[in-house]
Image (cartoon, coloured by chain):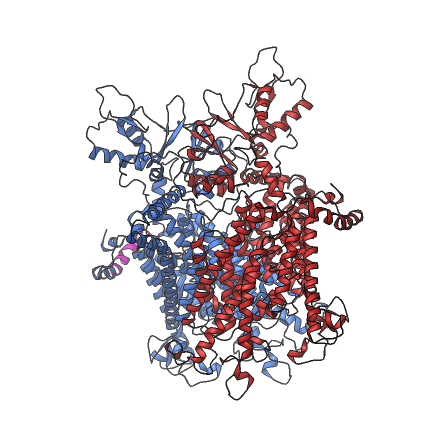
Chain colours: A red, B blue
């Protein structure tokens, strides 16, 4: 039971793609799924369990790994003759990065290149290449994410239409493309071209009647289930990390945490394919979040193309972080066709440390991606944006009231959704239910398909639904939503588009929309968190757009029938076009999205880029602000932060304020009754003592002090580095024995004549560890951790070492202060 | 010679406006100017000289002032019974703020309000008020800056037209408003309405002929000189801080430096008035930078309206910084009608510490300001933006070549301008020449007016010139720039706006534009830095727009005459409108502005908001990027950073990378041969010894150690706080004598029975000073200073205190590393 597919492990960087692998792929797919369904392997929870095993027993200095090499940049000056020890300064999986050291190393490399620049033409070329490689990666990322977004759009469209029928003239055409050559010119008939056959027509040979309805119903459900099954199987077998939206993980990675393979090429490939399948399966999910993940995978893979970055993983940290910020901007840019909104999204929601430096590159990547997408032209309208709308009427001050109501709805929906979804996800994680992810996806897909088919608003693609709801009723609009009386009998001479009494079509549309609203609300809660790629933007916007359109039509009818009421008298005469229900839908969509994600500026800018008019910014802002405030009243976390906490990632939110009065000494370990801190002394320990300390404790690093008596701090050494250095010394240096003296000082201590050769470990000592005094308020400590990206910090009192604070200690303390059970929440 | 006007000192916060003051104002203006011209008083250099006196003799721990009260937030826990000493924790003028402490204090206040919230309805209301006061201030700032921008626009327009003539029907109408009722309908004649009289018509009674030309010339120069004289006099007498663009100073203030009165109400009032005068005087300057200053003044004044902020200056620091970020966004928003660009400008160029937190409020302020400006409608076109243009033709790939050329021009211009302007400003500061600012302004204004009048492109308002250059030639355009042959004789049936042979009008326009370009380049160098409010955006954009339009017409004619050449053959047929010279002007304007300020994203977004089309972002980006790279090749500083350095403000640029390998011990004081660090011991000094140390040194703070022998660090005490505490103790406590023991410990040391009562100073001790080890690389130290906003940092080795590093030490070290003479550059 450790078969073929184990070859395609999540550690995808090692897997190389070849024909042989491809054959294995198919075999693995065919066989392993049937086997694995029962044996409940891995999954997205895979790396949660990894976290478990790593956090077990590690008390402090847990999140460690590579400070030593950073110190080498300074100690190099002292120990120029010593060679660096291979392996020192790298990180383990699921460990936190020390940003300060990493930045240091990056600059060190820069300096070397700069100083060599003048030596020769070749070195100069290399320095130019180095300076331009960042731009190159960003450009490639933009190109690739634009192209992938285009492919995904086209493929998802085609597969989506495949649920209803097939194009006889060319299988690979979707419904719209199939009917482009059709001779039918009226709008209602345009979609019914002879080349396009529904499944009922093809199988039963009849287009109408209950038999054909049932056949279409069956085929719709069949295809939906097939797509869903294929998607979840691919994710399960080849790339467990491809599930979900990916934004919580990318936030965590950008904050400095290592999840190997999360941005690898397998994840990219599988996420792209399964995203198409998941969208086509009709599940209540969107492709916007996963597109950000896809773009980040592209950025990460391209940054591997540069040998200097791929050789030493630690070296490429800062670089790849910058690329990831740019990539997430590109992802949103292609998702909505909003480059500026994408940059602000990256700034507001995703990025952690380097927002300003990456601003320019993010903008560039977002633009490149947007232009590639436009030249692919997946929507066939040569528009950059997904939902391009133009409104012709201004809004009136009174309308702010319904807009704010929509904001309240958005905030309530956001708060409700986050609670319900988190509760459901927690249930999935803690009960046996979570062990059958494939079954779960199929069940949800089946319910979605069966309930969705009868209602035209849920049957159609969610993006198209949003587009229809956003669009204002014009004279050419044939939708049911636009069946107003005055347009049916043209007796009155009011201009087209003016407010009018609703015809029965509108009323039945209202009913169907209400049902669709309830359906979407319920299904989205159960869908987000399934083991398929799933974004939240589109479902949230759909819910908001439905609610908004309903409110908009209600206000419109109110204004029509009571146009002499004091509220409407001033500006809404008979026959005027004073209410735009499409605008309500847009405001509602922004409010609901704001309630779920708690984004503000980037959201308004994204929607502003959709409409292109500054006019409607005030309604949007009013609704988004209301939605955020209402949502915050029920809990300050957005859905991404909630999922980060659910999964127990060590993420220190930069936005949340630390509001307690505790001091560093209240948080540091060891506590009063704990065993004393495990420390090393700088020159009076033997190798045996050192190894003893290492084997007895599980800490990831040890402070080095002058002597047990003075407790004065010298530096900090990492467990991993010490182990590697000892092994290295044993292999290369002769005369190293168990009673060899270990010293971290500049010069060897004076030893008795017969003692064995001492072991010098100064090169792995970080001689500039961060320290705070025990009286430092925790809010300052938290600020330092956030802004500098520390992993640990030593605590002193009057110059003596007292204890240590790690990122995990801070997170645990914050959970404790928020009256949550720290052990159940952190790293569960 | 210390007369009336001294009453209106730059310390304007104390000056209250009353009728009495107003009378004094006028008297002061009339008398003092004639007197002061010779006595070379104050001036914008005033606060440079302040800096001189403060920096003299202060070696380290110079930039200090208020850490003690921050510590009180932590020591409060220990000394709950001790009352805070009044005055402790405030700052002197021209001192640097310690951000960490300030943030701490702000949160302390928040916590108090939050904990009281549940006590009573009144406290709850107060907490609501507290939560909303930020929004209130931001809203008020937006309203005020929008209104002021509208007033400035209208007044400057009126005064500008006053140079040419006057409206007989209503004095206060400008040329355009005067002619609104005119019956003339053709475009050429519309401006010549009977109500509007030029000065020649009014005085000589004739509109044509050399006599009237000379009279108009004379009146033009006369008014220009009057406006310039009035502007410089007002600035000189009432608000020296109102000169210049203000952006360098605002950047410095936001980075945490105190310049009292720089954002006061006197500065606001005088800057508003003199900005109108300076713009109307025809000097080569713009109003965009000063508008940012005006908006920041509004923000600062409104934040004073809230009693809790105005009472304790230290308390309002973080708050006002946030408001200032928002205010600068509002300033750019009204300057260009580009709210999103304004927010990005604030983020990219101005703000230092809190970009993300203020994003939402900045956006809100920018929007409010933009909408107020639009409802005032100063341009009479109900457009939000200054230069609204619409282009109808796309651009072609080949055109990227001239666009990049324009970028190179922009970069070269930027580099040249920065060098020339800084050289001139340095000359002004160092020679006697700078002692006659009024004379200088009048000279420059006279030269500008005399040279500008004969050339129609320099005579008109610079904003109007830019607008004309941006606009594409349409069928209704009557400007000289649009005199193409095909439009003159309509024999050919090409559509209007198509490329055509240029008529003589275009050629003479080209000559005049070339002369205008040379004139603008020279005058701008001498104008920026004059003692009047002066922005750089508009002159830079004008230079770029002129160059761009010239290039654009050249390319257009090339394409017209060689339309079968291989470059043009594909896309530029005869009669097609393939080249848009207006677009070249826009690209050139962006490139030149980019070269001078080195802004990137915000600049592109501002121009994007002007045109509203994503189409033209690629040409803009290409030009702006080229311009930045070319400019950076000659020196990485933008004009604002260059002026900051010229003025010697302690500004640590967040964008510039520290690329040297020095360690903390190379930078810290004392150096090897210096006198040892002045330190206090925690419990074995007498009051006399303490006072002796304080009087003998000029340091602003002193580390407190356990004892001279151990050198272990306990905390940090500020000079100002110690002085205040001693005086306070002398007044209130009895038995404090010169041989009283001073102690910083928790409990009084055991003393002989006959010794006088000891003095406890623990409450002013900052018990959590920042420390780094002597081996810490300076790049990390610089990073800490930037990100945390420190003022000083103590250096330890193995737990012993070694020295201290202040912000000033770092700046001096950086100047040293850049091979500049540190003493001549810093704080000169």
Q: Quadrant of the C terminus of chain B?
A: top left
> Residue A357 in the image: x percent, y percent?
54, 49
Which portion, as a residue range, is magenta? B28-44
Left or right: A401 with respect to A192?
Answer: left
> Residue A54 in the image: x percent, y percent?
59, 36
The quarter of the picture where residue B729 lies is top left
In the depicted structure, whether residue A371 falls above or below residue B64: below
Q: Pick out the residue farthest to the top.
A: A753
Q: Main secondary structure of the magenta part?
A: helix
Q: Is residue B664 magenta?
A: no
Question: Does the image show residue A493?
Answer: yes
Left or right: B355 with respect to A274?
Answer: left
Question: Does the image show residue B510?
Answer: no
Left or right: B474 with respect to B305?
Answer: right
Q: Residue at x 45, y 40 (%)?
A: A816
> Residue A161 in the image: x percent, y percent?
69, 67
């Amino acid at each position: 039971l450790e078969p073929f597919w184990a070859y395609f492990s999540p550690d995808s960087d090692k897997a190389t793609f070849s024909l042989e692998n491809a054959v294995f792929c198919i075999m693995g797919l065919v066989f392993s799924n049937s086997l694995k369904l029962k044996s409940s392997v891995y999954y997205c929870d895979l790396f949660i369990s990894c976290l478990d095993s790593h956090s077990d027993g590690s008390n402090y200095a847990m999140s460690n790994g590579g400070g030593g090499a950073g110190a080498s940049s300074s100690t190099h000056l002292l120990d120029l003759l010593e060679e660096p020890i291979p392996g020192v300064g790298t990180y383990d999986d699921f460990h936190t990065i020390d940003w300060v050291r990493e930045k240091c190393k990056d600059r060190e490399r820069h300096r070397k290149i700069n100083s060599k620049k003048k030596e020769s033409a070749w070195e100069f070329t290399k320095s130019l290449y180095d300076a331009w490689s960042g731009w190159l990666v960003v450009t490639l990322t933009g190109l690739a994410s634009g192209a992938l977004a285009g492919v995904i759009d086209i493929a998802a469209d085609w597969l989506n239409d495949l649920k209803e029928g097939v194009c006889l003239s060319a299988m690979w055409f979707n419904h719209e493309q199939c009917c482009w050559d059709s001779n039918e010119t009226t709008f209602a008939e345009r979609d019914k071209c002879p080349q396009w056959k529904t499944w009922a027509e093809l199988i039963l040979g009849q287009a109408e009647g209950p038999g054909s309805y049932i056949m279409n119903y069956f085929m719709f459900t069949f295809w939906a289930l097939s797509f869903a099954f294929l998607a979840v199987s691919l994710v399960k077998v080849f790339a467990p990390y491809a599930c979900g939206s990916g934004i919580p993980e990318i936030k965590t990675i950008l904050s400095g945490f290592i999840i190997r393979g999360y941005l690898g090429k397998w994840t990219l490939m599988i996420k792209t394919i399964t995203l198409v399948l998941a969208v086509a399966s009709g599940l209540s999910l969107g492709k916007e979040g996963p597109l950000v993940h896809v773009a980040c995978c592209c950025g990460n893979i391209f940054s591997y193309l540069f040998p200097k970055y791929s050789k030493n993983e630690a070296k490429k940290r800062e670089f790849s972080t910058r690329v990831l910020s740019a990539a997430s901007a590109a992802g949103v840019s292609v998702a909505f066709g909003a480059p500026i909104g994408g940059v602000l999204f990256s700034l507001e929601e995703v990025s952690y440390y380097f927002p300003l430096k990456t601003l320019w590159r993010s903008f560039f990547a977002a633009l490149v991606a947007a232009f590639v997408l436009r030249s692919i032209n997946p929507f066939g309208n040569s528009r950059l944006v997904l939902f391009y709308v133009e409104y012709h009427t201004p809004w009136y001050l009174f309308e702010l009231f319904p807009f704010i109501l929509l904001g309240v709805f958005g905030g309530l929906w956001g708060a409700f959704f986050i609670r319900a979804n988190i509760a459901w996800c927690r249930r999935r994680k803690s009960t046996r239910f979570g062990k059958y992810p494939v079954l779960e996806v199929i069940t949800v897909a089946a319910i979605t398909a069966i309930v969705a088919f009868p209602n035209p608003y849920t049957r159609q693609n969610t993006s198209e639904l949003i587009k229809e709801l956003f669009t204002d009723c014009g004279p050419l609009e044939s939708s049911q939503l636009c069946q107003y009386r005055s347009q049916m009998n043209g007796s009155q001479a009011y201009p087209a588009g003016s407010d009018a009494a609703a015809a029965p079509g509108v009323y039945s549309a209202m009913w169907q929309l209400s049902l669709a609203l309830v359906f979407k609300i319920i299904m989205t809660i159960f869908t987000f968190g399934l083991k398929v790629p799933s974004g939240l933007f589109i479902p949230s916007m759909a819910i908001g757009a439905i609610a908004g359109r309903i409110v908009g039509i209600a206000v419109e009818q109110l204004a029509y029938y009571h146009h002499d009421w004091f509220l409407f008298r001033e500006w809404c005469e008979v026959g005027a076009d004073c209410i735009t229900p499409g605008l309500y839908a847009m405001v509602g969509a922004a409010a609901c999205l704001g309630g779920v994600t708690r984004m503000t500026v980037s959201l308004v800018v994204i929607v502003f880029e959709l409409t292109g008019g500054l006019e409607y910014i005030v309604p949007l802002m009013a609704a988004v602000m209301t939605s955020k405030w209402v949502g915050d009243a029920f809990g300050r976390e957005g859905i991404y932060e909630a999922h980060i906490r659910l999964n127990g990632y060590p993420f220190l939110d930069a936005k949340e304020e630390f509001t307690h009065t505790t001091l560093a000494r209240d948080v540091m370990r060891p506590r009063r009754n704990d065993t004393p801190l495990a420390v090393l002394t700088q020159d009076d320990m033997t190798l045996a003592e050192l190894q003893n300390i290492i084997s007895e404790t599980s800490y990831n690093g040890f402070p080095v002090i002058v002597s047990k008596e003075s407790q004065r701090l010298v530096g900090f050494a990492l467990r991993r580095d010490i182990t590697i250095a000892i092994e290295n010394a044993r292999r290369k240096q002769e005369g190293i024995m168990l009673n060899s003296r270990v010293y971290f000082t500049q010069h060897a201590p004076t030893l008795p004549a017969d003692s064995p050769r001492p072991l010098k470990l100064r090169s792995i000592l970080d001689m500039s560890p961060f320290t705070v005094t025990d009286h430092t308020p925790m809010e300052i400590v938290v600020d330092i951790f956030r802004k500098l990206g520390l992993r640990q910090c030593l605590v002193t009192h009057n110059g003596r070492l007292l204890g240590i604070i790690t990122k995990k200690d801070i997170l645990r303390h914050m959970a404790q202060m928020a009256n949550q059970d720290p052990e159940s929440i952190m790293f569960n």
